[in-house]
Image (tube, rainbow, N blue to C red):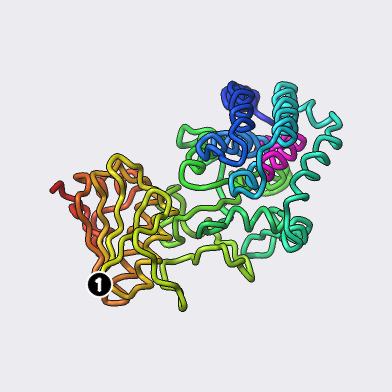
Amino acid sequence: MDQMDDEILSMFIEDTREHLANIETALMDMDRGGADIDEELVNTVFRAAHSIKGGAGFLNLNNIRDLGHRLESLLHLIRSREVVPDTRVINQLLAGFDRLLSLVESGPASDAEDISQLLAALSDITAEHLSTEQRAQAVAVIAVTLPGGEVIFQEDELSLRQAANGGKNLYLVEYDLIHDVQARGKTPLDVINTMESSGLIIDCRMELAAVGDLDAPPVNRIPFYVLYASIVEPDIIGYLFALDVSRIHPVPLAAAPPLETPAGLEAPQAAAAPASGQAFGPWLLVPDPDGTVMRLPPGASPEAGPAREALLAALARGKAASIDWNDAAPLDAAMLQVLVAAARAFAGQGLALTHAHGTPRAVADAAARAGITPEALAAVGLPPDLFVAS
């Protein structure tokens, strides 16, 4: 902590104040909603806890990171409708976020405070709603290592599996604060915010010990490690962060649970055909004898996770499919990745995947933002001029 940059700490405190500015109102609204949760509201509160935990991990503020993690775990169960946000749960969350803000305001001195009772209370509520298998996963520790075997993170198995739900891939990403961050005019918090836009940071830390001392040969790098979950596939993840793929390491999870979506868009061996009008988030899958239409309602925002699930269901039918975009909003990198994987998967089975009513240049614009060339798109059967207004 002695070498922590004061400017980055100030930015972290200011960001936290912004995240928590309306948190009490949001939590009270969740309480009034009961079992009928407002997903957008819950996601907003979840992201607040998650972002604060990520910044605290980088700054090595252990109490803040641990409290953020406990809040995040309980909110995850609310998001998945395993916990109803009743008055008891909301009061505990209010107490947790109130203490979280006070810890952040204290900066490095926060690690001297005793928050053990608060952590235990949050853990108890969470544990009440876990299955026997999940409780075992919550205490099982998994070491996340570099290819050479060096342990970078030690995480509970439950957190890793929750982060990987929805078909996300896990990565251990190696940044160099000197060349990948500072030399590009960025701060570590900029990197964190960029990564959060296309996935979920599970943990992160800076490794100052790797710098060595003056008696050792100069290293000229400061490692910054990020444990990351994203729907973006390994073959294009390097484009997303402008890093060499040799510094992005997939993290395998053995014996994946049934809820976890396959890493690619390979068709399940025994997938059931989708029912007429089956919904996947905002997407509607409508099968007919000649193929499957995957439709987005007018004005809806494309969501990569549900789109992946809908495409898997369409692929399982073994027939051609068409995506009706209905003049959708611009795509993000995660949605673009799903389209690339889908183009490969359908072509691999000799099936057509076509598109209709798209936003002009949506694919090209999304690719440009991710640093993917038109040639790279064409190579996987996804030309940049694919979407034309009709």
What residue lies at 59% left-to-right and 49% top-to-bottom?
A: 80
Question: With 74 as the anchor, is 265 left or right in this view?
Answer: left
What residue lies at 19% left-to-right and 45% top-to-bottom?
A: 360
- Above or below residue 256? Residue 151 is above
Question: With 281 as the anchor, is 138 left or right in this view?
Answer: right
Q: Main secondary structure of the magenta part?
A: helix
Asked if residue 65 is among those painted magenta in the image, a careful observer would answer: yes
Asked if residue 51 is among those painted magenta in the image, a careful observer would answer: no
Q: Is residue 11 visible?
A: no
Secondary structure of the residue carrying tag 1 is loop
Q: Is residue 265 visible?
A: yes
For badge 1, the amino acid type reads: Pro
Question: Callout 1 environment at 10 Å: few (<14), some (14 to 19), or many (20+)?
Answer: few
Which span is picked out in magenta?
57-74
In depth, the one of 92 and 158 nearer the eye is 92
In depth, the one of 141 and 91 nearer the eye is 91
Q: Position of residue 138 (x, y in %)?
A: 75, 56
Q: Which corner quadrant of the image does residue 92 belong to?
A: top right
Residue farthest toward the left in the current orientation of the protein: 390
Question: With 85 as the anchor, is 314 left or right in this view?
Answer: left
Q: Position of residue 229 (x, y in %)?
A: 55, 53
What residue lies at 59% left-to-right and 45% top-to-bottom?
A: 79
- Above or below residue 313? Residue 43 is above
In depth, the one of 42 and 183 nearer the eye is 42
What residue lies at 56% left-to-right and 51% top-to-bottom?
A: 228
Q: Which corner quadrant of the image does residue 146 belong to?
A: bottom right
Q: Which corner quadrant of the image does residue 374 belong to?
A: bottom left
Q: Position of residue 48 (x, y in %)?
A: 59, 33
In depth, the one of 248 and 324 nearer the eye is 324
Q: Which residue is mark 1?
A: 289
